[in-house]
Amino acid sequence: MSAVAVTAGPRRGWKSVSTWIGAAIVGIATICALFAPLLVPHDPFVQDLSKRMLPPFWMEGTDPAYLLGTDQLGRDYLSRLIWGCRISMLIGVTVTVVSALIGIAIGVLGGFLGGRVDDAVLFAITTRLSIPVVLVALAVVGLLGSSMTLLVLTLGLLLWDRFAVVARATTMQVRNLDFVAAAWCAGCSRFRILSHEVLPNIASHLVVVATLEIALAILLEAALSFLGLGVPPPLPSWGLMIAEAKEYMFFSPWVIVIPGAALFVLVLGINLLGDGLRDLFGARTDP
Amino acid sequence: MSALLEVEQLEVNFGGRVSAVRGASVTVERGETHCLVGESGCGKSVTALAVMNLLARGARRSARRLSFEGQDLTGLDDAGMAQLRGNAMAMIFQEPMTSLNPAYTVGSQMTEVLRRHRKTSQRVAVDRAADLLARVGITAPGLRLGQFPHQLSGGLRQRVMIAMALMCDPKLLIADEPTTALDVTVQAQILRLLAGLQRDLGLGMLLITHDLGIVARVAHRVSVMYAGEVVESAPTAELFANPRHPYTKGLLRCVPVPGKTPRDEPLGSIPGTVPRIGPGFEGCAFRERCDYADATCAHAVPRHAASAGHDFLCRLPA
Amino acid sequence: MLQFLVRRLIVALLVAATVMTLAFILTRLSGDLAISIAGPNATQADVEAVRKAYGLDRPLTVQFFDWVGRAVTGDLGESYFFKTRVSTLIAERMPITITLGLTGLVIALLVSLPLGILAAVRENTALDRVVQMVALLGQAMPSFWLGLILMVTLGLQLGWLPISGTGSWEHYVMPGIVLAFSAIPALTRLTRAGMIQAMGSDYIRTARAKGLSRASILLKHALRNAAIPVVAIAAVQLGFMLGGSIVIEQVFALHGVGFLAWESIGKNDFPVVQAVVLVLAVIYVALTMLADLMNAVLDPRLRGP
């Protein structure tokens, strides 16, 4: 197994501008996600064909009621964008929770118990890495139909590898430290050692992995929705919006630029925040 | 004829905050071994690296005079120094285990020096490399040339380093603690080798070490460094017989000499530790640990000559 | 060394076996396949006929071992839709996917290596931060969106490159760029980190002490060591690219293996889906073994005393 997560980024932790930008972006996205029903100027699902394909406010011929214009079915773009943010964040967080539970459990077990158990864990990780994730996710949704629950479960069952790798590596490092040996000698049970000595010390690394996994889950869901096998329509996933806009992109490029840019900015923000957290916690695992 | 290497008032600081070398002066003559001795952190390695201009980024070097064979080195840029390095001036380091590139064979690392500076053919370079490997006491040189560094022991690697340094017939060899990382038995062999080569090739050698035993064995001249300064400098025999600086005296007291050091008495030691000197420090750096210190030691300290070729930096009379 | 390779081979076989099982389970997830194949308008009799024709009435274990046995000999079954052998279908489409993957990898290396070296040499300067920011941007970029943007700008507005199909080498440029974007961040960071570590090492100090040229020190001595993990990761990244090509192939209408899988999912063509998952997994495992091999070739220390 090659070295754990290679990292880079400005090494200035919470003082760095980029971390604050990331935090701001994530903050805005969280607010959108939580308060979407209150924030949307229009109902994102209501169609009004008389008002279809209106351009956004910086172009000519706009309607001020629809700040970012409308899509091909007359639905307000801004509202769909905000709602899409809610969907992205929801999927990102839930998938990460599922994959974290699976990955951390596997990784910690392997790292702590070593031996045959660890061999099995490594084998599981290798197998998982060799599976083409997008293809399998598409196949599952294609065969069993689109639903949020299925999507979250599928992605969660496919994206646990980074958690497992990091949890395993850090557990192995911590296991060899003196305070663990001291707890062992004091007669602590394995479970107690795991919960009181190991987990607190690997937590910071896992938080960093979690932020990156949220970003990855969001990107994957967008790709799946783009291909039509992700979030069930009419839910306005940004990926779906891009797919729907594909037909019009040559004449009205803003229809793909806007949701794509939103996706890009959100993922970038999460990554910046993750890098900042990494520097803050000193949780670098690269050479 | 000018000395081989002349260093006068060398100063090196890192980032303007840590003064590693504060006015060191060293002269190495042709065919002479000059030892620079001192404890860890005194600036002896930094001095050697400064001479070769191999300091890390962020280090600032200045000197009243820094010349090699009469040629001024301070004005040379990196490309200019590169012409001299590995060529007329060579250096070997302390850690033979990590000082050779693991990805290339011993032979290729040796031949590239000669080909770089003399533009010879591969054939000529290989022959020279084999010759030198034999010179440094390595058997089956042909075999060794094709091997990788990880296939050689520490002692062998250091011999390879020495041979590699000699590829272009250097006039000056700087050796930074060449035996510190080696087993005691191997140490003696390497020292013997270096002394022999120096004699046979008429090399000037600047040998950095913390070990007074090595100084006694191979050095013609010694300079003792403390906290970035040369506190005493003398021909070897003179220094051991007649040490003048309190630090030197203290060092010599610490080394047990069979027959001379009285038994049943504690070995000498120097209390305290080497201070970290920032810019703007005045006076003698040793005063906190010195038995003879007084108020004047906090100000400028004079450098006396005790006898011909023997000077020391102290307020005590010559 | 040999022992190591044999062990890796065994693991590879076990992984392939596990993936085979998972792929089989995957296609049986939706319950009764016969119903899906027969279609929504089929009668009970139709469904039964389909079930018999495709051998779906046999017990699951029998179906599984039948498939495994045939797959091992290269017979990946017959496509329900195309009525040809799956192995033929995959073999026809594979060159396109591999070309795409290799193009992406080459572009990624051509960008990552120089950028990583540059960032390492100018460590902690503005240039270094710019390179790291570029890596971050690449990581956040949704690949399908980038593909569409490139299509609109380079393909349509500027007319430089064709936007779909596989006629000539130009057809692979935009898809290659998009694929490269997914690998550039990791490879750049790895190169940078490796070069920084190499440049700070003792053997580079020796190289400087020998008076070697700047270029020689950087490219011959430092890069040679820093590149070892990069080469290995590059092989693995190729594996990821091949596995993830399905999105790019769909966007740019490249009829490779990913596109085939995409069509087959839509048509419920299970043998094809099953087989593609297996083939991609086997290729990935082979690439990781290649990565290990290259590590051994490039690092003399791994070859043994």
Image (cartoon, grey):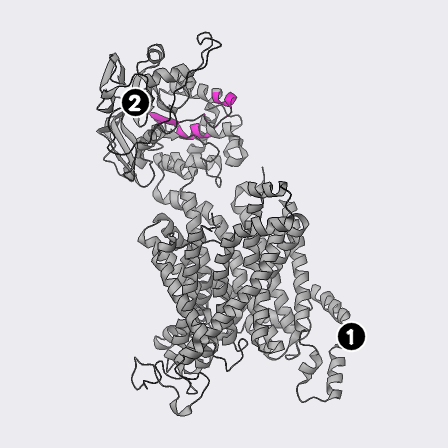
Q: Is residue B163 magenta?
A: yes
Residue A58 shows in this picture: yes
> Where is residue C128 drawn, in percent x and y?
35, 53
Range of residues picked out in magenta = B160-187
Tell me: residue B132, above or below residue A79: above
* Amino acid type, label 2: Arg
Question: Residue B199 at x, y = what percent?
Answer: 38, 17
Q: Secondary structure at mark 2?
A: helix
Which numbered circle lies on residue C291?
Answer: none
Nearer to us in this view, A156 or B87: A156
**In this figure, what is the number of numbered marks?**
2
Q: Return the x and y of residue A148 as percentages of the image width and height.
A: 56, 75
Q: Position of residue A172 (x, y in %)?
A: 58, 47
* Mark 2, residue position: B287
Q: Residues within 10 Å of mark 2 (few under 14, many from 20)?
A: some
Amino acid under disc 1: Arg
Q: Left or right of C48: which side holds B143?
A: left
**Badge 1 element:** loop
Q: Quadrant of residue B308?
A: top left
Q: Is residue B55 left or right of residue A157?
A: left
Query: Which residue is drawn at the image coordinates 48% and 61% (left, top)?
Result: A212
Q: Which residue is mark 1?
A: C58
- Which is more foreground, mark 2 or mark 1? 2
Q: Nearer the viewer, residue A177 or B37?
A: A177
Residue A78 lies in what quarter of the image?
Answer: bottom left
Q: Is residue A150 above or below residue C8?
A: below
